[in-house]
Amino acid sequence: MPAKTTTTKRKRVPRKAKPGSSGLDAIECKLDVSDSSIREVVTRVEKEGGSIVGSCRDPLGGKPLVIAILPIGRIEPTPFQRDLSEAHHKKLAGVIQKTGTFLDPVITVPGPDGGFWTPNGRHRLEAMRRLGAKAITTLIAPDRQLAWQILALNTEKAHNLKERSLEVARIYRGLIDEDASRPETDFAFFLEEAALVTLGFCYEKKPVFAGGAYHPILRRLEEFSDEPLRKTVREHEKRAEMVLDLEERVADVVKRLKERGLTSPYLRTFVVARINPLRWIKGDLPPLEQVLKTMRERAGKFNVEKIKPQDLASMAGGPPDEE
């Protein structure tokens, strides 16, 4: 595998556009409910016992949208979403009950086997179910690919690293089920970071996992591949196994440090930083597999007797271990 240079790709921040220079005028957003672009959605809504409230074109991209009221039982969250937060949906239910009005439609797309999926609205959906609602307002996008863009869409509750990683892993497996022959790079937008795929596979096998300690290393060395998903999934699974194997060694070092009376929420981060060879490398970077192998060897030779309390002080500003 060729070495990787230290050039880091930065996410491009869109330049602020001139006011009134993008998208459609308000009058151009009108879309008749009989338009051919939404015919299949309208038919499905009626078949599922819902009612069409209106239709329009998205004012930025001009894509067709349908506004409908659907039976609440005909909507399900996409199967690759993060786990439901009990506290969050109960809090939402309390707010909705207090106002007596549901004002924030859930976004949905046609489901693959009937009904509808929501990539953005799971907690609102569950809150309404908690209140015993019969129906719910929804904004329907005919393009089911929108369901894969959950990380970009789901803003009602901030994702932590574990949630983001697990969602990416679930999206990845869903993409494979649909068509494993497509190149991984086609889905870079949906998946956000190649490192999140590997971390997601780690969290699937070990839910209590300190992913934050390894994320900076994976993010620096992993990139999306032009190879098909059926091949790249095996690479991510292999790397996940290597990370979990390394974590066992690191966990042993952390345990021995604690036995010496060293206590800090940054112990694991400290150990990972000490065995990480990247901080000394100038120029081309080695492959991730080589780095993980080196770190595993260094963890096995880690001398806890040489570590002093003052050595941990430099980690106070870093991210605490996730456990």
Image (spheres, grey):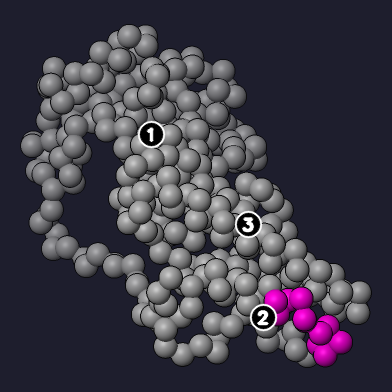
User: Is 304 inside the magenta-drawn segment?
Assistant: yes
- Mark 3: amino acid: Glu
Task: Decide if residue 191 is on the left or right side of residue 234.
Answer: left
Query: Residue at position x 54%, y 82% from top?
Result: 278
Q: Which of marks 3 and 1 is nearer the N terminus?
A: 1
Q: Residues within 10 Å of mark 2 (few under 14, many from 20)?
A: many
Q: In which quarter of the image is the C terminus?
A: bottom right
What residue is shown with label 2?
Answer: 275
Query: Residue at position x 59%, y 83% from top?
Result: 277
Stretch in magenta: 297-309
Q: Which of marks 2 and 3 is nearer the N terminus?
A: 3
Query: Residue at position x 13%, y 48% from top?
Result: 23
Where's residue 174, x and y in %?
45, 37
What residue is shown with label 1?
Answer: 178
- Mark 2: amino acid: Ile
What residue is shown with label 3?
Answer: 241
